[in-house]
Amino acid sequence: MIDLKEALDFAEKLALKAGKFLLENQKKVKIKKYKDRQDIQTNIDLQVEKIIISAIQKKYPKHNIDSEEKGLIDKNSDYTWIIDPLDGTKEYFRRIPNYNTSFCLFLNKKPISSIVYLPYSNQLFSAADGKGAFLNDKKIHVNNKRNLKNSIIYLFPPCFEVVNNKVFKNNFKKIKKLTEKVYRARYHQRQNSFLSFLALGSTEAYINFSFPSAIEDFAPGLFIAKMAGAKITDLKGKKLDFSKSGQLYIASNAKIHDQLIKILNQ
């Protein structure tokens, strides 16, 4: 078993290094290729990924690494680093300060530590199994709001590219129902960032019921939210497997969770 505190300290320093690189090199960003009609890969994605992977391989040469651009580097280890070197490439390319760098360390199929760093605002969210969640080394916790009418929730916006027309329309019907019940319902696809804001107590829930995402897009933020006291389930209220891509889920402050599930399943 590795020293978890040492691993978290290492990840925090590495995230700060990666974030500094992102801030200093934004004017140099160029599109390398289009992954599909709605997604891009840039030179900065590849460069910051190289920095992160090289550092992990030096510190933990026997660990697996699964990164957004590089894919899986399999060392047949019980430990796997899940990495999104630049989460928010499209925003970064357009000079919108809403991006992050995110890591999540798994032991077998269980997350044990996590980092989400927002360079522009210098917000370093972290969590370790059994230790809680932190923002810039100060402990954080979800809030205790119980009333949907006072709740702000964030939703992953429906994406027509990945669902059929019937599902796409049905998703908007669900959004309408939610909007009628809560104080504010807002779209944002940056899952790791807004799951961290849930952990901070700034929002009451984050819901992805429309876009089956890759594991690096949500695992770091979900683990931070969990360690801050969030309740996390699939859309039916059942236990969520953090180790699989393609997950649809509800993460909330726990107080409004059952109400949200009821609305989404009407």
Image (spheres, rainbow, N blue to C red):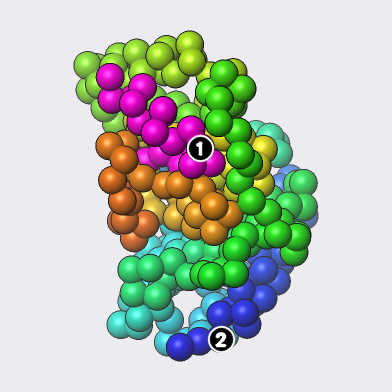
Type of the residue with mark 1: Lys
In the image, what residue occupies the spot 48% across and 33% down?
256
Q: Which of 34 and 59 is in front in this view?
A: 59
Q: Nearer the viewer, residue 93 or 255?
A: 255
Measured as percent of width and height from the top left, residue 257 is found at 44, 36
Q: Which residue was labeled with disc 2?
A: 3
How many numbered circles does the render carry?
2
Q: Quadrant where the N terminus lies?
A: bottom left
Query: Magenta stretch containing residue 198, yes or no?
Result: no
In the image, what residue occupies the spot 37% across and 57% down?
242
In the image, what residue occupies the spot 70% across and 71% down?
13
Q: Which of marks 1 and 2 is nearer the N terminus?
A: 2
The relative height of residue 223 versus residue 232 in the rendered view (above or below) is: below
User: Callout 2: helix, strand or loop?
Assistant: loop
User: Callout 1: helix, strand or loop?
Assistant: loop
Q: Mark number for residue 48? A: none
Q: Nearer the viewer, residue 254 or 73?
A: 254
Measured as percent of width and height from the top left, residue 172 is found at 37, 15
* Left or right: where 64 falls relative to 24: left
Query: Magenta stretch containing residue 255, yes or no?
Result: yes
Q: Quadrant where the C terminus lies?
A: top left
Q: Which of 62 and 201 is in front in this view?
A: 201
The image quarter in which residue 50 lies: bottom right
Q: Which residue was labeled with disc 1?
A: 255
* Left or right: where 91 falls relative to 211: right
Measured as percent of width and height from the top left, residue 71 is found at 38, 63
The image quarter in which residue 69 lies: bottom left
Type of the residue with mark 2: Asp
The relative height of residue 8 versus residue 193 in the rendered view (above or below) is: below
Residue 79 visible in this rendered orientation of the protein: yes
Magenta stretch, residue numbers: 248-266
